[in-house]
Image (tube, grey):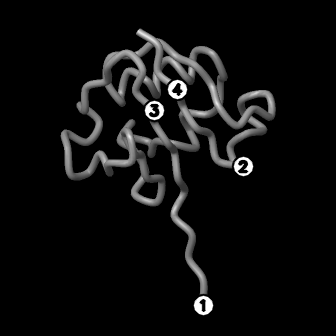
Amino acid sequence: MSIKVLIPTPLQKFVGDKSALECDATTISNLVEVLEVQHPGIKARLCDDSGKLRRFVNFYLNSEDIRFMENEATELSDGDEVSIVPAIAGG
């Protein structure tokens, strides 16, 4: 199943300077693993040392925040779009 993944500018250097990728994945956690296999080093930017998604990196499935779904266990379907959005703080 093909999932479109939108990559934010700060992470594009880890994926060959691409703003979008196509991946085959069944859940958000599986997507992170697939991205790591295809682009080694990106998982460390998305997950903490225990393997959980970092709090300041938000994932959206078809514009819906996965924190209000099943978080990392959120299931993906063919044609879905996942946006990775790093939180931005300012003052």
Q: Quadrant of residue 19?
A: top right
Q: Which residue is mark 4?
A: 4
* SS of the residue under disc 4: strand
Q: Nearer the viewer, mark 2 or mark 4?
A: 4
Check disc 3: other Cα within 10 Å, few if <14, some if 14-19, many if 20+.
many
**For the residues bearing labels 1 and 3, Cβ distance under 8 angstroms:** no
Check disc 1: other Cα within 10 Å, few if <14, some if 14-19, many if 20+.
few
Q: Amino acid at mark 1?
A: Gly
**For the residues bearing labels 3 and 2, Cβ distance under 8 angstroms:** no
* SS of the residue under disc 2: helix
Q: Nearer the viewer, mark 3 or mark 2?
A: 3
In-front residue for pair 42/1: 1
**For the residues bearing labels 3 and 4, Cβ distance under 8 angstroms:** yes
Which tag, 2 or 4, sits closer to the chain's start?
Answer: 4
In three-dimensional space, the C-alpha distance between marks 3 and 4, rounded to whole angstroms, equals 5 Å
Which tag, 1 or 3, sits closer to the chain's start?
Answer: 3
